[in-house]
Image (cartoon, rainbow, N blue to C red):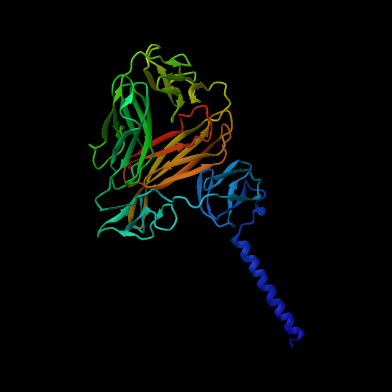
Amino acid sequence: MLKKRDTLFLFSIFSIIILIIFAAAASIYPQPSSLANEQYGYVIVSSSPTHMRVYIDGIYTKDKTPTDPIRITSNVTHIVGVSDKTQAIVVSPGETRNLFFNLTYTCSNECASGAKRCSGGIGYQTCGNYDTDSCLEWNTLTTPCASGQTCSGGICVSPNQTLPDLIVENITFSKNPADEGEVVTALITTKNIGAITAPASYTSVSVSSGTLPLYVYSLRPNESTTHLYGKVCGAADITFDVTADSSKIITETNENNNNLKNTLSCRPTQNQTCTDTDGGLNYFLKGTVTNSTGSMTDWCGTNNLLLETSCISPNSDELNGSVIDCSTLGNYVCQNGACVSTLNQTLPDLLISNLNVTKYYKLIGNSTIKRVLVSTTIKNTGNADAGSFNIFIEGLNFIRDSSYGFLAAGNFVTYTDDYECQYPHLYNVTLDRFNAVSETNENNNKASLFIDCIV
């Protein structure tokens, strides 16, 4: 039988163990209530079936367990997503909100079929279907590179392969040949077949009506991107003359393989009638053109571009398609299929007000290293506050993709990047690339700075 003294001793030991457990739990899980005076709150996300790839405002937050609190800016609307489901949420300072998602899917693709990624720097993994479900995932087995090679961007490269190489991989049409007046979509694919990542560039599309530059984000080795280009068939065939890196801002392994051409065959028709609800070539009113093959409505593309469709003449069935940058008309932006004046509108306007670089030497051990300090100032010059927006920065061998929660009218924020300058390159900044914020000017969200590494 335990004596009273022994019982008290055991009770003391048990109490100490309980206190240690509570102290450990407090150190592992943050206590949101202690942040009541800060500008953040928390959200805890769970789902059925369990699928903890969580996105906040479209940004992947890494895999989470159902008990992981995710810190978010308070008093701002955030879009929380799991798989194809989303919920809008606003938290108060220090508040913790629990969200539950009832998912209806069985699986989702982790990657694109045939894609490759590096594994350990000495080999690569290939995307395919390697398990019992119907979705794609990365192979757990690594294909090793040959002796002396390393993996970069999903492909094995030799030490002397140090440049990107952009090509126009293909130009295909939704229909070819097509009848006069038919709207045909051209699919234009730009690909990097080089050994290192290609920075952002432009692929130009030239047809008889003019040249249109298409913005291409940075492409990793063996990565491609496809643009859609709508064109109305006329009485004559249309040749698409497409050039990758048309502004020649990238040094490539091969500078002579950037161009590709393909011809859309158009079959002319006669004695048909065409109508246009906005009266013809009218950039300031959204219209719909109708002919014997169907109808097409004016629409806004990326970078403030308006695709305006009109009849060549009332007595024919032939359509005319033209593209215009609304900002070239003055204080106009493209909205809902027309160029709309921004005067007297209460909207924010995000722009890069300052982008500069300071170059210097830094002594590391016995080596002198060239480094750069890049300063980016983002300002809201509009007359309304800007909600959450995306900030996409491409430097030398790095990409920073982040979001900024709130920027009041007239206010600014400054970002800095400090890194080794190995060779000349472009430093690119893009704001609100998903167009989450409606602005007075949607055409001033990008800036680039050429850095030559000369100290």
In the rendering, at what x and y percent does residue 343 appear? 54, 21
Q: Name above or below for residue 11 compared with residue 157.
A: below
Q: Which corner quadrant holds the N terminus?
A: bottom right
Q: Name above or below for residue 261 compared with residue 328.
A: below
Res. 281 visible in picture: no
Residue located at (58% from left, 56% from top): 68
Extreme-right residue of the structure: 4
Q: Name above or below for residue 221 compared with residue 3.
A: above
In the rendering, at what x and y percent does residue 339 appear? 48, 21
Extreme-top residue of the structure: 315
Q: Which corner quadrant holds the C terminus?
A: top left
In the rendering, at what x and y percent does residue 401 appear? 46, 44
Residue located at (57% from left, 21% from top): 344
In the rendering, at what x and y percent does residue 64 appear? 54, 55
Figure quadrant of residue 149: bottom left
Figure quadrant of residue 248: top left
